């Protein structure tokens, strides 16, 4: 599976971005969406959308976290990164820091696609492609916004 991963759009997203996601199998937004219009725009790309609520999202009905299995990987999506992965989770994807991350913490891999609208600490405006194939190591390709 090829998943487009983004975070921290903060109610701003380049109009061309959803078109880049049309070839994805899924799209994941890791919080601080700030407006349902952003989710609507992402849905126009076509692939299924998973998203979590960030600390700037005022919609209590949006989930704070999502836990699921895909291609044999146990995955946890959150906006604010936990200090450790939940029990049994192999991949933790988060936003919040506006800084890209690919780091092994205990038995889990923590990934952050960075921020498209307001990157932090000299990081480029970015999003990422996540490749998941059962029985293989993950692929993580950070993509600078162009």
Image (spheres, grey):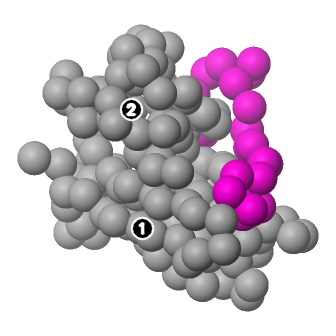
Q: Residue at left 41%, top 45%?
A: 4
Q: Which residue is mark 1?
A: 140
Left or right: 50 with respect to 7? right
- Tell me, yes or no, if residue 67 can be seen here: yes
- Asked if residue 59 is among those painted magenta in the image, a careful observer would answer yes
Q: Quadrant of residue 37?
A: top left
The image shows residue 60, relative to residue 119, as above or below, that is above
- Mark 2, mark 1: which one is toward the viewer? 1
Residue 121 locus on image (x, y percent): 28, 69
- Which region of the structure is painted magenta? 54-75
Residue 82 locus on image (x, y percent): 71, 65
Q: Residue at left 62%, top 54%?
A: 80
Q: Is label 2 in contact with label 1 (beta carbons under 8 Å)?
A: no
- Tell me, yes or no, if residue 38 can be seen here: no
Q: Residue at left 55%, top 61%?
A: 132
Q: Which residue is mark 2?
A: 10
Mark identifier at residue 11: none
């Amino acid at each position: 599976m090829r998943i487009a991963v983004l975070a921290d759009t903060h109610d701003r997203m380049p109009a061309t971005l959803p078109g880049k996601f049309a070839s994805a199998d899924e799209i994941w937004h890791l919080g601080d969406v700030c407006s349902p219009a952003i989710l609507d725009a992402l849905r126009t790309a076509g692939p299924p959308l998973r998203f979590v609520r960030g600390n700037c999202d005022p919609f209590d009905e949006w989930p704070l976290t999502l836990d699921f299995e895909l291609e044999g990987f146990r995955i946890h999506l959150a906006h604010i990164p936990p200090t450790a992965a939940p029990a049994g989770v192999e991949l933790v994807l988060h936003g919040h820091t506006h800084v890209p991350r690919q780091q092994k913490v205990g038995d889990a891999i923590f990934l952050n696609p960075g921020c498209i609208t307001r990157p932090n600490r000299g990081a480029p405006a970015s999003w990422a492609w996540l490749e998941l194939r059962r029985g293989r190591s993950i692929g993580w390709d950070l993509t600078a916004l162009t």
